[in-house]
């Protein structure tokens, strides 16, 4: 058995944050498929009891313990392994600040917009889509401006903050509705730097589950 077992599925950007970190950090890990898209398994009380009472992926198993919430997992892994870790207390705070911003403003609105736009069985209310898009774009603009004079979120090297922002950045435009090269060139350049890291893989190559064509 691998040192780390990650409960994940191909469409989950939050799971991708951790999967990509594990791969780029060169850690010994294996995926455990979570049938979310077709089976809705995370809503099953038995799954929640066994894996995560919050009903969410990712869940990381290591040394007899389970960890959930991508930001907390990334922080734990950086502290345990030293890989992509912030340098000192000030950088640790700065990484946490950006991870919280990502989870609250960047990932949350982009992930919900993408799901409703690409995978919701019934056509979403256009007003809801417009609201979500309108909430994500200012968050993207913050990151775009921040990356105008630095290679990565904290400076010249990637840290766990970058893996947090990578969660939904690499899904296709057909799903997200965003051509980042056009609307956020600094962010697009950051994506290329992340994709150049040893161990980088596309989410649909890195995690298990069938790739599903957008429904609209």
Image (tube, rainbow, N blue to C red):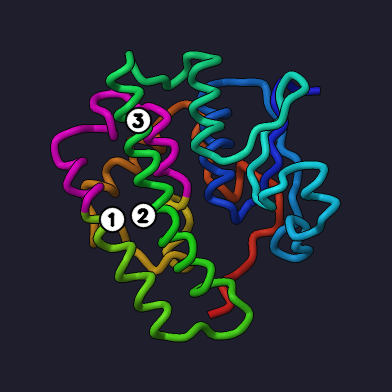
Please state the horizontal and vertical placement of residue 133, each as a whole percent of the image.
35, 70
Circle on res. 139:
1
Q: With respect to residue 162, does 170 lie above or below?
A: below
The region drawn magenta spans 142-167
State left or right for residue 63 relative to residue 75. right
Q: Residue 146 in magenta? A: yes
The reply to whether the C-beta atoms of the residues labelled 3 and 1 are less than 8 Å apart is no
Question: Of residues 212 and 64, which is closer to you in this image?
Answer: 64
Task: State the residue at coordinates (65%, 33%).
Answer: 67
* Callout 3 secondary element: helix
Q: In which image quadrant can residue 177 be found? A: bottom left
* Callout 2 secondary element: helix
Please state the horizontal and vertical placement of residue 182, each as a whole percent of the image.
24, 61
* Callout 1 secondary element: helix
Q: With respect to residue 95, does 202 lie above or below?
A: below
State left or right for residue 93 relative to residue 47. left
Circle on res. 95:
3
| Label 1 CA crowd tier, 10 Å (few <14, some 14–19, many 20+) | some
Q: In which image quadrant can residue 35 be found? A: bottom right
Circle on res. 105:
2
Mark 3 vs 1, N-terminal side: 3
Please state the horizontal and vertical placement of residue 14, each as a whole percent of the image.
54, 47
Task: State the residue at coordinates (63%, 38%).
Answer: 68
């Amino acid at each position: 058995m691998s040192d780390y077992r990650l409960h994940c599925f191909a469409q989950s950007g939050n799971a991708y944050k951790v999967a990509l970190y594990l791969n780029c950090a060169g850690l010994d890990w294996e995926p455990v498929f979570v049938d979310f898209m077709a089976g809705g398994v995370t809503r099953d009380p038995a799954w929640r009891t066994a894996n995560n009472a919050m009903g969410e992926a990712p869940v990381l198993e290591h040394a007899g313990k389970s960890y959930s919430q991508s930001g907390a997992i990334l922080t734990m892994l950086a502290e345990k392994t030293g890989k992509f870790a912030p340098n000192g207390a000030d950088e640790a705070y700065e990484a946490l600040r950006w991870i919280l911003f990502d989870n609250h403003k960047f990932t949350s609105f982009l992930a919900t917009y993408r799901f409703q736009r690409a995978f919701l069985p019934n056509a979403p209310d256009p007003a809801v889509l417009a609201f979500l898009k309108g909430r994500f774009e200012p968050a993207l603009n913050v990151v775009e401006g921040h990356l105008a004079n630095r290679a990565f979120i904290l400076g010249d090297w990637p840290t766990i903050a970058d893996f947090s922002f990578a969660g939904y950045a690499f899904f296709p435009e057909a799903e997200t509705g965003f051509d980042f090269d056009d609307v956020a060139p600094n962010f697009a350049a950051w994506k290329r730097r992340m994709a150049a890291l040893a161990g980088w893989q596309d989410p649909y190559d890195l995690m298990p589950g069938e790739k599903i064509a957008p429904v609209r």
